[in-house]
Amino acid sequence: MRFVLGCGLAVALAVSAAAADDKKDTPVDGKKLLGKWEAKDLPGEGSMVIEFAKDGKVTATATFGGKTETKEGKYKLDGNKLTVSIKGEDKDHTATVTKLTDEALEVKGDDGGPSVTLKRVKAK
């Protein structure tokens, strides 16, 4: 299960959509990043919710194959570069935020990983 969550988190955080070169270094508004985001279009029937907190903490909860696991860590946003450090992992996950609105977060993994779109989870 740890492998599944790690892979899911890597896909979601080492993530998303490619941007035009002229937007490559455009800083994003970090306040818009705060809150819960749900990854869309994950392979299989998996799901993942990532929460970015005001204090630089991040929590990811993934469900794959009927099993749920939660991981915690820290994040840092520098311009449009997002770095996530998960407790117990030796390597940080880095991505470029290519789109950040009130409703959508798109990132592209700096390791050449696939693009992933996350949708804001509305408070109940």
Image (cartoon, helix red, strand yellow):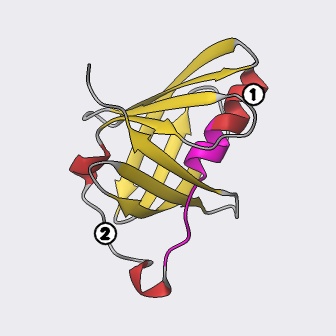
Is 91 rendered above or below residue 24?
above
Inspect the image, locate mark 1, and give the three-letter code of the amino acid beneath it: Val
* In the displayed structure image, the side of residue 103 where residue 105 appears, left or right: right
Taking depth in this image into account, of 123 and 61 the one nearest to the observer is 123
The magenta stretch spans which residues? 9-19
Which residue is labeled 2 in the image? 27
* In the displayed structure image, the side of residue 97 where residue 41 appears, left or right: right
Inspect the image, locate mark 2, and give the three-letter code of the amino acid beneath it: Pro
Which residue is labeled 1 in the image? 4
Is 77 rendered above or below residue 6?
below
Location of residue 70 (image quadrant): top right
Location of residue 68 (image quadrant): top right
Report x, y in % for residue 113: 70, 58
Taking depth in this image into account, of 101 and 94 the one nearest to the observer is 101
Q: Secondary structure at mark 1?
A: helix
* In the displayed structure image, the side of residue 29 where residue 74 appears, left or right: right
Is 17 rendered above or below residue 33?
below
Identify the residue at image location x=30%, y=30%: 122
Report x, y in % for residue 92: 59, 46
